[in-house]
Amino acid sequence: MSRSSLDLDRRGFLKAGAGGTLAAAVGGRTLLQQRAAADEDDVVDPEAGDELVKTVCTHCSVGCGIQMSVEEDAVVGQETWEDSPVNQGGLCSKGASLTQSVNSEQRLKKPLKLEGGEWTQMEWDEILEEITGRLDDIREETGPHSTMWVGSAKHSNEAAYLIRKLAAFYGTNNIDHQARICHSTTVEGIANVWGVGAMTNNSNDMRNVDVNLIIGHNPIESHPVAWQYFQEAQERGGKHIVAEPRYTKTAAASDDFYQFRSGTDVAFIYGLIYHIVENLEAHDEEFIESRVMVDTWEEFRDDVLPEYDLETVADICGISEEELMELAEELADAEVSCVEWAMGGTQHNNATGNVRAYAMLNLALGHAAQSGGGTPIFRGHDNVQGATDLGVDSSTLPGYYGLDEDAWEHWANVWTQTQSTSGEVSYDDLHNRFHDTELMEKNGFTVARWYEGVLDDEWEIYQPDPLRAAIFWGHGLASLTEYKKVKRAVNELDFIVNVDVFPNQVAELAEDDTDVYMLPVCTNVEEAGSVTNTGRQVQWRSQAIEPRHDSRTDWELMCDFAERLGFGEHFDYDEVEDVTREWNLGTRSVGYVGQTPERLKAHQQNSEVFSAEDIQAEVDEDHELHGEYYGLPWPCWHEDHPGTPILYDDSLHPSEGGMDFRANWWDEDDPDVDPEDQLRDPYEPDWWDGEIEGVPQYPMFSTVLPDPENPAAATIPIEGAFDEDTSVADVAQQLDDEGYDVELDIYEEFDNPQPDAPWGRGRARMKAWNLTDEIPVHREPAVTPRPDLVEDFPCNERVEDHWRVELDNAGVQQDNIDAIDELVEVGDVDPLVLTSGRQVEHKGAGAVTRSTKGTASRAPMMYLEIHPDVAAEIDVEEGDWIVVTTPHAEMLVQARPTGRVASDHAFAPYHWSGILEGERVMDSVPNGMEPLVIGESINCGTAPAYDRETQMQETKTTLCNIRVANDDEIPELSDRQIRWQEQRMDRNKR
């Protein structure tokens, strides 16, 4: 429904709720003292310490600056960092509770081993010798591919880089992290439209939007501090329009709202493009002709778009034609618009298609590649962007280099040339660490379906042996779908290692006869390193205190693992900054080059000189930071480059952060591909006297290394790209003269001297011939409320080897084709579309926030949002226990009646664990380390379908029915949790 049709009383109530969320998001010292603690006696005084240490919040990807108050090597409070350009002092309830997280009694304090149902405390040397000895045994007996390594979006850039390097030297590509199940489809989809899969701008730039289409994102709850910039856009006359299945708090604070069925994003977007192109003729033909591959646009316009007329889309999406036209016209009338999304758009079986469609809408309007435009994609965890960029991924090495021989050759060269370690390694040396060439160049298991490699029963696996051991280093298992299978897999492994601050779900799921190792690592407050926020800005975290208890830093523990596994000479760093310098040397592909430790620390120490308006330093020309953008957002091509605030913005000189779409589609080995079709038209920018031409990527820009003593230095291709008197052909010749193997004839025609980014000057594309759906199409959810649409819009067909396991979305869809009819028999209402999402107080699988009093007490209930009419039908009120049945599980949660969901939808947060299908599963958690609040994991019942291109899980759309729980079904909660729930419900009533 459009917002204009909403009931005014309901809208007013929900807007008040949204305002309350904001009040908790943007306070200063008062917020920290009053909001961070649940009770008055928990209030900490930020002035109690004798030192304030600058760091970055460890929760979401906004990257808020914060100062920890330290006394006698203990965090005693926290203070706002008022001149941080990212958040200007604002913090949400999670960030405001950071002191409590660091000081939580629920933390792991000593290395522990679960054996025979008992936890035994061990010394570090003893437990590491045992773990690495067993890893060596597996390597000898079956091979390194029999292990699974799961890193973390909570790691610093340095630790993320090291765990990928660690897996490489151990000899496996079975290495992954949270990005697989939050934004892998963003990376794949957007990279296949215009170059790289990242946010095109930054949070601060949201103040410049004219019209912002928010689809699949609820920033007031998921990224609340960033909302201050959304509010500023509204004050300047900009509009935010929410299109969602659920009336979120963001919808309440926005200017318009359109409600459509979950899982129909491609059709919804195509309906908007159809009206813009066919009826309004408001698409930007000049932009398309100059900067988009015209043949891909014409094929999309002529062959695909006519299938998505307004009547068809209205039927698929459950929205009226008039509403589609209204929204399309709003976007078409905008001076510039953007399309913003998060996990609501990415967690579907067709999500790569979703995000490509979002970008295609942006291209059709000509609103890409400029301030206030593009795709401001909001990532989840604090360093999910950096961990992805630095290779914690089963399909690539750091920097998206892939897994082929050239990629391994490059990193072997880096790991030999680096001054940060003493080791030397060749491609052959690395090859010998793997089982064979096939596995060395083959995608590994993903975190989304790693358990299939253990169970080896329902699906065939595509490696020689099952998984025998798993190392989970900062990853909560409750965020995974098919959660009952996860539990089975945990207990069928030879052993599992949990390296974390809190016990997390490994301890909850383990049974008495399972071998579990718990290794305590410190919080990010207790170690130094860098972190990349959602806007590609890299910030330095200073270490506030020494690691608490007997915990260790991630990066030092990874180096210890490497030493004990026999390749310590490649991990003998003297300090964490040495790791930064190593990825400066090697990660040239996306420009993680110029963000040296020295520059990052200078930005932290001089944050007051950077404008919150455009994140640029406001200093005189002779100042060392002149021209630089805060956090040196990547690509930052060399030690003097200012960073890139807006991707693909051709209105800036390349030396000031300007660029074009990446010339990424040219395959020099394909005779049918004409590079001229993929290079942009010439144009005359204000910063250049004459024409700038389309050119390919500069040869070898991502593999030629500088003198290793200066890892951030420009190389021949990078220096030549920026040189106004040098052409692509000149660079190719210089490389040839230096002895590099360059095919000169490919580049000889590009002999126009001009400044460029090393990516060249290419075109975006509407058709990706390397993907299964070359042009996105609508595909029904695997568990759909519209089985009548499946024949025309089926899921993708079966794939034999999909990250080492079979994928059969179409089979799952057919198995569940009658789900809506079958669910009628197991509940008391008509079946509902079940979707999931975030709570403002919790993060990820909730291990930190549910163990922190300030957040646990503010959100102590796992709930299912249902429409008041549905609640009335079964006579339940807030807090009443209900049974939620899906085709995959039967779960017990508490009801939350609200007008935020439509009468045919239901919503649940995904941060919970400790209850599994109604049963409390806390017996194996070490005594005294149980989370403060527990609840059912909704991922026990979500759909077992996955994105065809990335293996992203489908958590946003399934079907359920509900009934009132019987008294004997209600799980046991602690008195403390019940008290907090009663207090919260009393406050809500008031």
Image: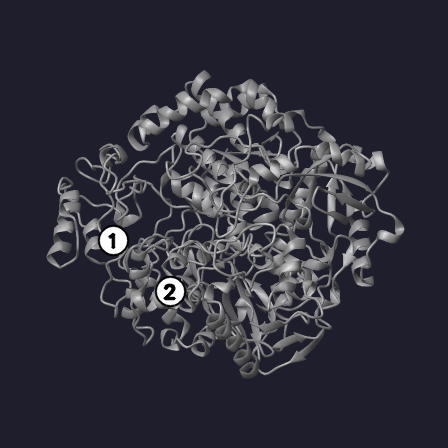
Of labels 2 and 1, earlier in sequence is 2
Q: Residue furthest top?
A: 279
Q: Looking at the picture, which amino acid does disc 1 mark?
A: Phe
Query: Which is more foreground, mark 2 or mark 1?
Result: 1
Depth check, front residue: 793 or 33: 793
- Number of other residues with Cα within 10 Å of mark 1, as a class: few under 14, some 14 to 19, many 20 or more: many
| Residue 975 spot, x, y in % from top left | 83, 62
Secondary-structure class at tag 2: helix
Res 701 label: 1
Q: Looking at the picture, which amino acid does disc 2 mark?
A: Ala
> CA–CA distance between discs 2 and 1?
27 Å
Name which residue lies at 61% across and 58% down. 477
Q: Residue furthest right?
A: 967
**415 versus 186 height, above or below:** below
Image quarter of residue 668: top left
| Residue 38 spot, x, y in % from top left | 73, 61
Instruction: Using residue 592 as the reference point, say whether residue 513 is left or right of it.
Output: right
| Residue 481 spot, x, y in % from top left | 62, 50
**191 versus 112 height, above or below:** above
Res 77 label: none
- Number of other residues with Cα within 10 Å of mark 2, as a class: few under 14, some 14 to 19, many 20 or more: some
Image quarter of residue 168: bottom left
**421 versus 85 height, above or below:** below
- Mark 2 and 1 residues: CB-CB less than 8 Å, in contact? no
| Residue 830 spot, x, y in % from top left | 77, 32
Q: Is residue 284 visible?
A: no
Instruction: Using residue 477 as the reference point, say whether residue 988 is left or right of it.
Output: right
Q: To which residue does mark 2 refer?
A: 602
Quarter occupied by the N terminus: top right
Q: Is residue 643 visible?
A: yes
Name which residue lies at 49% across and 67% down. 142
